[in-house]
Image (cartoon, rainbow, N blue to C red):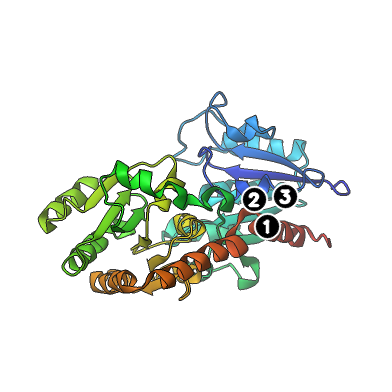
Amino acid sequence: MEKNRIKLAILESKYYGAVTSVNDLVVRLDKERFDVTFLYLSGDPGRENHLQQAGYKVCYLSRSERMPVFRPDVLVKLIRFLRRNQIDLLHCHAHKAALYGAIAGKFLPQMKIIAHVHGLGRSARLRRKLSNFLFAGRIDRFLAVSQAVKQDLLDSNWRIPASKVTVLENSVDYERFAGAAAGRNSVRQMFGVPQDAFVFGFVGRFAPTKGVPYLLDAFAEVKKEFSNAYLLLAGQGPDEQRYSQQIQNLGLQKTVCFAGYQKEIEKFFGSLDVFVIPSVAEGMPRVLLEAMAAGIPCIGTSVGGIPDVIDGAVGFVVAPRSSKALAEAMKWMLQKNPDELFQMRTAAAQKARTRYAHAVLSEQLYAIYCDVLGIKD
């Protein structure tokens, strides 16, 4: 390794677009210390890539759209690339990339390898347990996005010591979401919500793990006591028709609005009084951090990393799969006076800025890299 020059490669199964991820932390690393390449097991080299446009080196190891089976030719290309470019540290995201990285590492004993685990249940299948058992010994460090994910990783595998697992929480672009309430009135007008309404909101994929049916049942109970309550649902997914039918059955068509995909999600958050995340399974939901950065009090369930994020100063944590518990927390929010809500908004934004901002987590990632590489900085 050159003095003051670390050759770092980020390996993913494919390019996922300009989404918030660890890449947001990597691009904040000192370019005088890090020479960064973004590697993808598959993908179209002609596709627009925001990292390449920002001046970073990008390499696709195959042109396949998907790689449902293990491909030895891609592994060979990976080994050749890593050896030719003398990569010091390979940071792999999710299981497929980590598997390729660990096997490649068998041929490159000097290279350090990090495997990043982003959610719960990633080692539930026997096949993954076996692959982890065979190759986890080559991984120098596992990163988990929450304490719950770390514990799940340790409980689900036979060969991963706790000393090898470090928690690196997700991060948020604080500057993007701070001050989002400026668009409050325009967004409410867009969806026909009265300006004096008390608005709860959800953002996420319309899928079973997100627990939206429990939120809809809870909101129906809230409406029995609070006529000024509204609910906005932003997102898309396979269960949208199911939710629509549930809304009709509950008679909530006039006060529950589907907002669809929101490109400027920060403006959507600004229209809310309280954000609700009723998930039944989570790793570390980034959308929760975005809501807090926008200064929105939050109600969440006690799954995954949610309890690590929400404390009594910024909101409530309730039991999962409990419409009754959600309803009680929502009613409690409706009964708080404006000064109390303002204090919660302030506390949420402050916690997002001091604990979850990209700049804060980028420093933590840098410290982890140095530790794995044995660098005393």
Instruction: Answer yes or no: is residue 139 visible.
Output: no
User: In the rendering, which numbered label is found on residue 25?
Assistant: 2
Residue positioned 60% across, 57% down in the render: 357
Indicate which label's residue lies in the foreground, 3 or 2.
Answer: 2
Residue that mark 3 sits on: 89
Counting residues from the N terminus, which is met first, the one under dot 2 or under dot 1?
A: 2
Q: Is residue 264 left or right of residue 234?
A: right
- On the image, which quarter does residue 165 sit in? bottom right
Q: Is residue 354 left or right of residue 239?
A: right
Give the spatial CA distance, label 2 vs label 1. Answer: 7 Å
Instruction: Answer yes or no: is residue 50 visible.
Output: yes
Q: Of residues 97 and 367, which is closer to you in this image?
A: 367
The kind of secondary structure element at disc 1 is helix
User: In the rendering, which numbered label is found on residue 336?
Assistant: none
Name the spot of residue 253 as percent of width and height, x first. Answer: 16, 50
Please say if the residues under marks 2 and 1 sit with CB atoms less than 8 Å apart.
Answer: yes
Q: Is residue 3 left or right of residue 105?
A: right
From what the image shows, is residue 82 above or below residue 311? above
Q: What quarter of the picture does the C terminus occupy?
A: bottom right
Name the spot of residue 325 as percent of width and height, x first. Answer: 28, 74
Name the amino acid, label 3: Leu
Q: Residue furthest top?
A: 46
User: In the rendering, which numbered label is found on residue 365?
Assistant: 1
From what the image shows, is residue 5 above or below residue 310? above
Name the spot of residue 307 as percent of width and height, x first. Answer: 45, 71
Please say if the residues under marks 3 and 1 sit with CB atoms less than 8 Å apart.
Answer: no
Indicate which label's residue lies in the foreground, 3 or 1.
Answer: 1
Name the amino acid, label 1: Leu
Q: Of residues 348 and 152, which is closer to you in this image?
A: 348
The kind of secondary structure element at disc 2 is helix
Give the spatial CA distance, label 3 vs label 1. Answer: 13 Å
- On the image, which quarter does residue 141 sit in? bottom right
